[in-house]
């Protein structure tokens, strides 16, 4: 059995230290592999740079107002077609007011079977990383 990673509503969390050794993720019962939500002080995802290969579920990053990039996710190569969570999308990145780059998605090749949702990321000025 495999599980996803969910970190949410930890308003004072400044780091994901302790997760450096995570190299792969399964998915939870909703089809979510990685869910980061309401982490108001988190500025980087670099701690997750050991995460490599495909995700078995979807990816959602929501309401991380101090996050500037998602470069720590560059090792993810695919999002599985069975993903059903994340509002029915493969990748959801929304309401991250200082997010200026989604270059961390550059490792994903092929299709996003259920699509990509980018919303309310006011500092995002380029879609570089989706090539």
Image (cartoon, rainbow, N blue to C red):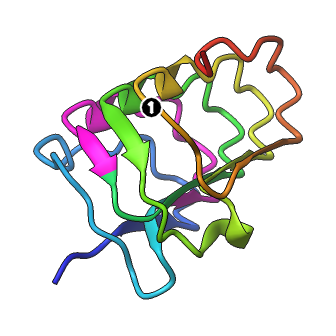
Q: Which residues are magenta?
A: 35-54
Location of residue 130 with respect to 117 vertically, above or below: above
Residue placed furthest toward the bottom: 29
| Residue 126 x, y percent position in the rendering | 77, 12
Please name whichever residue, 31 or 70, is drawn nearer the observer in this view of the structure: 31
| Residue 14 x, y percent position in the rendering | 44, 41
Q: Residue at x 38, y 25 (%)?
A: 74
* 46 within the magenta span: yes
- Report which quarter residue 100 is drawn in: top right
Location of residue 86 with respect to 1 vertically, above or below: above
Please name whichever residue, 57 or 8, is drawn nearer the observer in this view of the structure: 57
Secondary structure category for the residue under label 1 = loop
**In this picture, residue 86 sits left or right of residue 81:** right
Q: Residues within 10 Å of mark 1 (few under 14, many from 20)?
A: many
Residue placed furthest toward the left: 21
* Residue hosting label 1: 108
Location of residue 110 with respect to 116 vertically, above or below: above
Q: Residue at x 16, y 84 (%)?
A: 1
Q: Report the label total.
A: 1
| Residue 66 x, y percent position in the rendering | 65, 33
| Residue 125 x, y percent position in the rendering | 83, 12
Q: Quadrant of the C terminus?
A: top right
Location of residue 64 with respect to 9 vertically, above or below: above
* 72 within the magenta span: no
Please name whichever residue, 80 or 17, is drawn nearer the observer in this view of the structure: 80
Q: Residue at x 70, y 50 (%)?
A: 115
Q: Main secondary structure of the magenta part?
A: loop
């Amino acid at each position: 059995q495999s599980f996803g990673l969910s970190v949410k509503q930890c308003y004072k969390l400044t780091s994901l230290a302790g997760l450096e050794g995570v190299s792969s993720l399964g998915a939870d019962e909703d089809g979510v592999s990685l869910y980061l939500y309401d982490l108001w002080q988190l500025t980087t995802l670099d701690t997750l740079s050991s995460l490599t290969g495909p995700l078995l579920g979807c990816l959602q990053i929501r309401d991380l107002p101090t996050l500037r990039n998602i470069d720590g996710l560059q090792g993810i190569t695919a999002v599985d077609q069975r993903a059903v969570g994340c509002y029915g999308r493969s990748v959801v990145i929304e309401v991250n007011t200082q997010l200026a780059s989604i270059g961390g998605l550059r490792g994903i090749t092929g299709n996003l079977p259920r699509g990509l949702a980018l919303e309310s990321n006011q500092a995002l000025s380029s879609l570089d990383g989706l090539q």
